[in-house]
Image (cartoon, coloured by chain):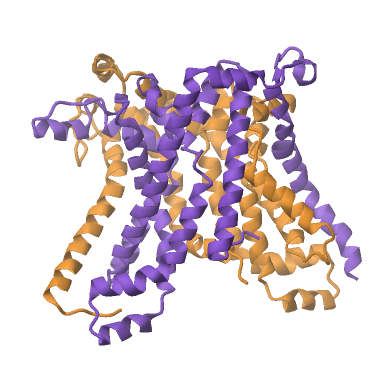
Amino acid sequence: MRNSFVKHYYIMMIPGFLLLLLFNIIPMFGIVIAFKDFNPGLGILQSEWVGLENFQYMFSLKDTLSILYNTFFIATLKIIGNLIVPLIFALLLNEIRHIKFKGAVQTIVYLPHFLSWVILSGILLDIFAYKGPVNSIRAAMDLGPIVFFAQAKLFPFLITGSDVWKEFGFNAVIYLAALTGIDESLYEASAIDGARRMKRLWHITMPGIRTTVVLLGVLALGNVLNAGFDQVFNLYNPSVYSTGDIIDTWVYRIGLLGMQYSLATAVGLLKSAVGFVLIIISYIMAYKFADYRIF
Amino acid sequence: MVNDKSHGSRIFDSANIILMLFISILCLLPLWYTFCVSLSDKTAAAGGIVGLFPVGFNLSAYKTIMKESAFFNSLWISLQRVVGGTIVSISTTVLLAYPLSKTKRELPGRNILMWILVFCMLFNGGLIPWYITMQGLHLTNNIWGLILGGGVQVFNVILVMNFVRNIPKSIEEAALVDGAGPWRTLFEVVLPISLPVLATVTLFTIVYHWNEFFQGLVLMSTQDKYPLQTYIQQLVVVVSTSNITKEQAEKMGKLSNQTLNSAKIFIAMVPVLMIYPFMQKYFITGITLGAVKE
């Protein structure tokens, strides 16, 4: 009886796989552009094959080192920030006993996660503007105004800070869920034994969520080449390219706008390939350490 | 919850509450500030006087928007994208997730198909190949480019698939005994039970389509085809970041219409703010529902 179902299952999957084929799989074949001197007029097949020339050229550009460094630096800052801040916040929020207050705070802090970077950038650029509120506060403290988003040295930290602000509430959900999974009776038993808050935190809470923390850390490693295109693209400007230009923004500017298709595809391919390897490694580690599987 | 009665503990509790209040305000303040600017007098906004409340309350920014057809045009494009994109996304996701939730025996070749899907989630050809594909499919400057361009959101498929796998076998077997074929089982038995995960995925998809700006920027060559986020990005964000030196900032202050920009930003926020309370209920459970339970 089930055998006749198989035909129908495959029919069901046709639309999905068609979409996958057209928009996920076929673009993968475009990778060959990285090995050719792509001429839009001639098309992909007719363009000249140049082997690894584009890659050699890429490594000779001084831009390349800069974007790689910026990408790693910003991504690493974000990984650290997005692991630690939500954790501390979750631990603190967990100590609040008033349930309605706790719920209200949670509701409020998840909100920035759902707003787009277009909107948040518009808001942030206004708040940190030359004549904006932050500079007004600086003026009140007798400090001169800064054009915040034009400072290359500040830029990676502004990016990280605003990203942590946006995501900490949402990221804390996972920690909070893990915290509620810790057995209440452990706390009660320890209280009878005279353990106070710090001891309880150290001996019960931390071990209880250790697996979750490790898991999230390991999974985050797979993302170390994604410094956050949407955010950086909306917040950056030529003054901060030296510290703010990441792989994806560079590929967009030089590759798409500048029409250096072959070069940009080569860079993109490298990023995708390295990213792929990193993610596989991180999933293997997650499986080994925390029994985590996606399917 | 264990109660400490010590002095130090009580101080901590009070400080914690104050900290939480402070953090909550920190999250809301930027949004509130934008709202206030949108309701303020134009020169006050440019001069940076607007603080916690509007200065020179007036609705002129919103009135101007009402007359601005480009804004509504982009809004309409975004709405089309959200509705079209969500319908396409959810239907293909469900139609993929249900068969893939079957075991290897019930669906021969299942494992290969899963690996293909997961591979697509982990690796992609990059921006340029995607763009050239879209050109080749004649989906540039076309609303269908926005609706279909994202491809399959494999993560959602996996989420729904895991949920369906956790549905007790007996329910589907009862349907089988009643003579239901795969389609009827899907629509009349599995879907109704899967409402929580479907609601979660739908809401996330809606927000994704609403917030997306980059595809609009890359695929459309004229402003009249931009979805709302791209429209705002070009008018507000690009202008802000291109006037970033001190001298330019001074000049811009006199020309830019911050109240208008803030009003546009605020309006773009409103749909998300409205859906948001409904999402609350779903997304916490939704994330855990889709997890593998073995």
Residue B291 appearing in the image? yes
**Which residue is drawn at the image coordinates 80% and 48% (left, top)?**
A14
The C terminus of chain B sits in image quarter: bottom right
Chain B tint as drawn = orange
Q: Quadrant of residue B220?
A: top right
Instruction: Spot the purple chain and give its letter.
Output: A
> Is residue B88 visible in this depiction of the protein?
no
- Tell me the quarter of the image containing the N terminus of chain B: bottom left
Residue A50: x percent and y percent?
72, 17
Task: Say which residue appears at 30% left-offset and 70% top-offset.
Answer: A201
User: Would you place residue A45 above or below residue A114 in this image?
Assistant: above
Task: Answer above or below: position of B92 versus B47.
Answer: below
**Left or right of residue B206: residue B281:** left
Residue at (61% x, 36% y) in the render: A272
Q: At 51% from the left edge and 65% from the top edge, which residue is drawn? A: B285
Instruction: From this view, report whether residue B11 is shown above or below residue A160.
Output: below
Residue A209 position in % (x across, y down): 42, 67
Q: Quadrant of residue A157?
A: top left
Image position of A62 with respect to A93: above or below: above
In the rendered image, residue B46, in percent from the top left (x then y), is placed at 23, 25
Q: Position of residue A55 (x, y in %)?
A: 62, 22
Of the pair B126 and B16, the residue shown nearer to us? B126
Q: Which of the pair A234/B232 is nearer the observer?
A: A234
